[in-house]
Amino acid sequence: MDRAGAGAVDAHGGTRSAPLVGRRVRLRPVQPSDYEYLYALATDDEVSHRWRFRGTTPSPDAFVQLLWQHSVVQFVVEHKESGRRIGHLSAFNADDRNGWCHIGVVIDPALSRTGWALESIALFLNHLFVTFGFRKLYGEVLEPAFADLASGAGRWFRVEGRLERHEFFAGRYWDLVVLALYREDWEREGVPLVEKLTNPPKPPIGRP
């Protein structure tokens, strides 16, 4: 994929790669040694209903095959200081001709609403826009999960569709909400955030 504007441009007119390391976390490629961890994360009771398996437990071999099916890029999220693995980020089912792909985000449930999660997702989205030049990134969430994201609609993402009573979970049918992150919205809101997350904090005024 080679599109105008796909790279970030610095003050001297050169291009730079998207950072994969923030203040607290780093993103690194998935390795075979991660498969057991990723399987446990994807089938965790608090996660599985929101992820592709929707509560099912595939065999380990089937899980690995599905993991790489139609994959564009995948990362394990690690805490910088401890090396603790805290999540999995993936881009898949890309449409190169039309400039979009789907994304999946799975973060340790104990950390899903923390700054670690925000930093991880911001680095990942920025990497996709800068490195691959996508113009849109799609995510799909069930109605209960969307309630936690709804405040970002119109600023960070746009709601492009709602499939009513689409999936069965916890005794009833729920809507599936289709979210789209646009490149222009990311450049306005996300790029400044990534710059903040990847630069050392400024010391208080009056201190060296």
Image: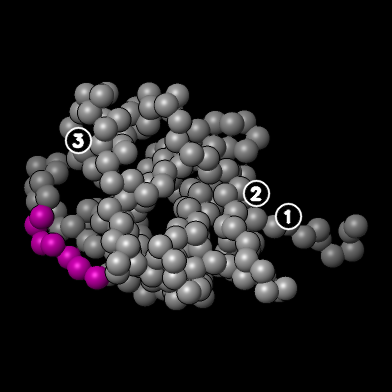
Label number found at residue 102: none
Majority secondary structure of the magenta segment?
strand
Residue 160, image x, y percentages: 24, 70
Label number found at residue 55: 3
- Amino acid found under the numbered disc labelled 2: Arg
Q: Residue at x 22, y 24 (%)?
A: 59
Q: Is residue 56 left or right of residue 86?
A: left
Q: Residue at x 44, y 60 (%)?
A: 132
Residue 122, image x, y percentages: 50, 57
Residue at the front extreme? 2
The quadrant the C terminus occupies is bottom right
Residue 94, image x, y percentages: 30, 57
Q: Is residue 49 left or right of residue 121?
A: left
* Residue 150 appears in view: no
- Amino acid found under the numbered disc labelled 1: Pro
Of label 3 and label 2, which has the lower sequence position?
2
Q: Dots 2 and 1: beta carbons under 8 Å?
A: yes
Q: Secondary structure at mark 1?
A: loop
Q: Secondary structure at mark 3?
A: loop
Q: Residue at x 12, y 50 (%)?
A: 167
* Residue 50 appears in view: yes
Q: Which residue is mark 2?
A: 23
Of label 3 and label 1, which has the lower sequence position?
3
Residue 162 forms part of the magenta stretch: yes
Q: Which residues make up the magenta segment? A: 160-166
Label number found at residue 200: 1
Q: Where on the picture, by quarter, is residue 180?
A: bottom left
Residue 81, image x, y percentages: 65, 35
- Amino acid found under the numbered disc labelled 3: Gly
Marks 2/1: CA–CA distance: 7 Å
Residue 116 forms part of the magenta stretch: no
Q: Secondary structure at mark 2?
A: loop
